[in-house]
Amino acid sequence: MSEGSQVLAIDGQGPLALGVAGIGLSAPALEGSPFIRAEDGTVYALPKPLHDWAFGVIARIQATGTSPFPREVEFGAHPRGIYARLL
């Protein structure tokens, strides 16, 4: 993850659709934290509740050899927590 990255803020005021160019793990890879890179180049660290989602997406990329990005991703909140959904 690059210096100056920010945590993706999900405020519960409604979903946020963000153009995501890619997803990755900060170093070291097996212990790092997941992040996304927006299409404008901004890097966002994902909040802890989205780590399982990110690990699942990264695992699918590794298993299939293809990435679903770039694409829009919806981030939002519901009564059980926060979520991310590929659009």
Image (cartoon, grey):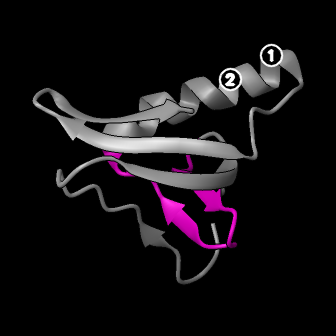
Determine the residue positioned at 52% across, 75% down: 5
Gap between marks 2 and 1, in whole Å?
6 Å
Q: Residues within 10 Å of mark 2 (few under 14, many from 20)?
A: few
Mark 1 element type: helix
Tell me where residue 32 appears, x and y as whole percent.
Answer: 56, 50
Q: Quadrant of the N terminus?
A: bottom right
Please state the extent of the stretch shown in magenta in the rendering. Answer: 31-48
84 on left or right of 73: left
Tell me where residue 54 appears, x and y as whole percent.
Answer: 53, 35
Task: Identify which residue, 31 or 77, lies in the foreground.
Answer: 77
In the image, residue 16 sits, relative to residue 61, either above or below, namely: below
Determine the residue positioned at 44% across, 29% down: 52
Task: Identify which residue, 27 or 79, lies in the foreground.
Answer: 79
Which residue is under mark 2? 59
Tell me where residue 30 appears, x and y as whole percent.
Answer: 63, 39
In the image, residue 26 sits, relative to residue 69, either above or below, namely: below
Which residue is under mark 1? 63
In the image, residue 44 sits, relative to residue 81, either above or below, namely: below
**Residue 21 magenta-drawn?**
no
**Residue 32 magenta-drawn?**
yes
Q: Residues within 10 Å of mark 1 (few under 14, many from 20)?
A: few
Identify the amino acid type marked 1. Ala
